[in-house]
Amino acid sequence: MVRNGHQVLSNVIASQHDLHAQYGGVVPEIASRAHIEKILPVIDQAMKQANASFDDLSAIAVGNRPGLIGSLLVAVSAAKALAWTRDLPLIGIDHVQSHLYAANLVLPPKEGQPQAIEKKPEIPEGAALGLVVSGGHTSLYRVDSPLDLTLMGRTIDDAVGEAYDKAAVILNAGYPGGPKLDKLAQQGNAKAAAKLPISLLGKESLDFSFSGLKTALLYQVRGQPKGRGREAYFERSASDLDDQTRADMAAAFQEAAIGAVMAKLDRALDQMTAEATPPSRLLVGGGVSANSYLRTQAQAWGERRGIGVCIPPMSLCLDNAAMIGGLAHHCFIQGQFDDLHLPAMATSQF
Ligand code: KG4
Ligand code: ZN
């Protein structure tokens, strides 16, 4: 539950990691069934944590795009039922757009800490540069307001989070891949491993590509494939490598993947400056913004380029309901409501 678009009153997340771990990735059917089981307890818990009743609500917001359609359908159906029975406006939110809003939210104080001052974060004038790094997206935006994004560049193949997840499988790092690879890389030294290639695409391109990096890591870990077609095989796997070598390779992967993101930030900043609209700050969002290396690199980039960097606190980096509720406030004040025909959509408009 979010008040006035910035004050988080509750943010309940039902993790499904344990359900998917044995498959090494998200199984859509299992995910949607778990959503059915969890949706009402999660709503109850969010109301309790916020110490609120349904009479305190002014609208029901739901992330209705993009994502796995079965899971989205559960959320959208529950939101419609609540909006209809409580006679409240319904607001469908694009969750990629809301990732860029997460850094504007103020979390509730932790137990035993003094009550947070209800202060709205100051938002500087002018357009911001937005970077979404998640499991499905790696995109750059010009952000003129929370609801006004213009796409500047995007991945042409894998998203950076997806590349992390695959790299974790290649390196036997465990599940969930992104956080496990992050941890493994912290024990490693990128310089001790062979440098991995990054693809910057055309000279002025703001797009991303991570599939070549993924393949380069695969060959480095397993060696060049031998044989052809169905007969092809690798000479070794990650389990033949010692822990330090795997950690060094993880660090080299991370250096290349995040290095590519930083290089594109440079280009995007230069482009906005050349167009006489230098960004007021950099907004970062999406699951990979929880990555320790990305967080330090982005802050260092901001210092080097003289621009403020806003990254959400860890608990608001991964998919969460607070960013949906916060962004919905801006739809609410502009009278942008949906009706009971609101669809669940697998893809984003951004
Ligand atoms: O935004 P998100 O929760 O879901 C999507 O919208 O996709 O992002 C999930 C992605 C996954 O690929 C996950 O592995 C990655 O974010 N991720 C990380 C870290 N934590 C989550 N990647 C690298 N380092 C992390 N610490
Ligand atoms: Zn997300």
Image (cartoon, rainbow, N blue to C red):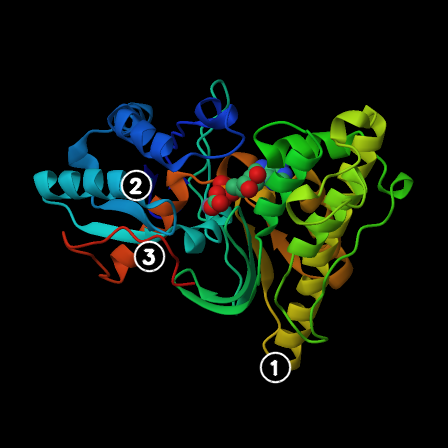
Q: Residue furthest top?
A: 112
Disc 3 from disc 1: Cα separation? 28 Å
Residue indicated by mark 1:
275
Residue 313 appears in view: no
Disc 2 from disc 3: Cα separation? 27 Å
Q: Earlier in the sequence, mark 2 or mark 3?
A: 2
Residue 273 appears in view: yes
Q: In the depicted view, which residue is nearer to us: 233 or 301? A: 233
Residue at x 27% of width, y 39% of height: 75
Residue 309: percent from the left, percent from the top? Answer: 63, 54
Disc 2 from disc 1: Cα separation? 42 Å
142 to 222, vertically: above or below: below
Q: Which amino acid type is marked by label 3? A: His
Task: Indicate which label's residue lies in the foreground, 3 or 1.
Answer: 1
Residue at x 57% of width, y 46% of height: 162
Residue 251: percent from the left, percent from the top? Answer: 78, 39
Q: Which amino acid type is marked by label 1? A: Glu
Q: Earlier in the sequence, mark 2 or mark 1?
A: 2
Q: Which amino acid type is marked by label 2? A: Gly
Quarter-of-image position of residue 336: bottom left
Ligand 2 within 8 Å of disc 1? The answer is: no
Q: Residue furthest bottom?
A: 275
Disc ID at residue 70: 2
Q: Secondary structure at mark 3?
A: helix
